[in-house]
Image (cartoon, rainbow, N blue to C red):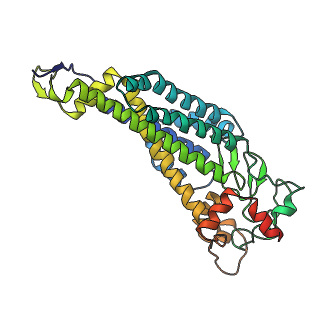
Amino acid sequence: MSVVFLWAGLKMDFLSLFIFYVIFVMASVLLICKCSGRSPNLPGRVAQGCSFLVPSWLQRGMESNSNRVLYTRSPFFVVLHVVLEAAVYGEYTWEIYGYCSELEFSRHHLLLPYALGAVNLGLFWLCCTTDPGTITTSNQATYVPVYKYDGVMFHKKRICATCQLVKPARSKHCGVCDRCVHRFDHHCVWVNNCIGANNTGCFLIYLITLTLMAADLAVITTTFLAQVVSLSKMLMGSYLDADGQEHAMNMPFVIQHLFLTIPRIVFLLGFLVILFLLIGGYSCFMLYLLLRNQTSNEWCKARQGCLPCCQGLPHKQHASYQNIYSKGMIANILEAFQPTAIFKEKGK
């Protein structure tokens, strides 16, 4: 005997709600990129092109508060990071873990997200607290000879206008932290710290574990939802539309039914998928830079063309950036995870 579901017409079905949810999350990410982009980089251009997705009043509100939240050291995004992670694990523990235990899922698989979460939390704490390589009057003589000046992006005897210190090659003054950082990559608002020579490797592993955590939770949640559909034999039934017509069960209706019965779990899955795509893509980009021994700061500047032209500096001929710091894949990896080794090498 077939199972019949009565489907009352809804003004907005699940698919419309889910699309709105995806647009809202993506628009929020693009707004952060737009507000945090001080230079015309790729995220800034993408955010400008997609600004039509965000209401004008929300754009004005974000821009009015961007200086306070994004351009000064603030624990706002650190707290938000912890709250979001706690919410995800709270929902997983409260509903999914218990249901999956009753369905006799592998206990090791169910406990793996907790192990990944513990490792990720430790790495997150290290990224927040580790000195990225702050240049001071007492250590600038140590940092200056570490990297050669390429004469295009980095020049000898340049003085930081803010710190009044000699700028070593590959260093940059962070306007958020108000300090010069050795091998500066970028300032990450999510860890409220700069990413530099001393924490680049830690930051990459943090991103990878966060990606794996999102992927594992998404796989468990998807498997759980598939089991719910299978055990209820929902796909073998039929449903009545608003006009009383009977239709064979299809996947869009099943998704809508799951949304109505267990909405938090479905939305959790959507959030995990989006998180996996965003963080996973960014992890691949950071890994690509690490293998080339290049920083995000250098990558962005290299795409501006002739750097002396962009900086308004006098020069006889156009100069393009060439990465002179790559020593091969293995050496580049070791330098990222053992930044002190290069000091010993220079000291010989």
Q: Position of residue 280 (x, y in %)?
A: 49, 48
Outermost residue to the bottom: 316
From this view, report whether residue 5 is shown above or below residue 230. above
Instruction: Answer left or right for 336 relative to 343.
Output: left
Tell me what residue is drawn at x 75 percent, y 71 percent.
Answer: 148
Specify whether residue 316 is in view. Answer: yes
Rendering coords of residue 125 (x, y %): 67, 39
Residue 132: x, y in percent?
73, 50
The count of marks equals 0
Q: Quadrant of residue 347?
A: bottom right
Placement of 337 over or under 267, stated as above or below:
below
The answer, for residue 24, to whether it is visible in the render is: no
Q: Is residue 250 left or right of residue 133?
A: left
Q: Residue at x 40, y 35 (%)?
A: 220
Where's residue 271, x and y in %? 44, 35
Q: Is residue 103 left or right of residue 124?
A: left
Q: Report the quarter where the N terminus lies.
A: top left
Residue visible at 58% across and 28% down?
83
Q: Nearer the viewer, residue 140 or 121?
A: 121
306 and 97: which is toward the camera: 97
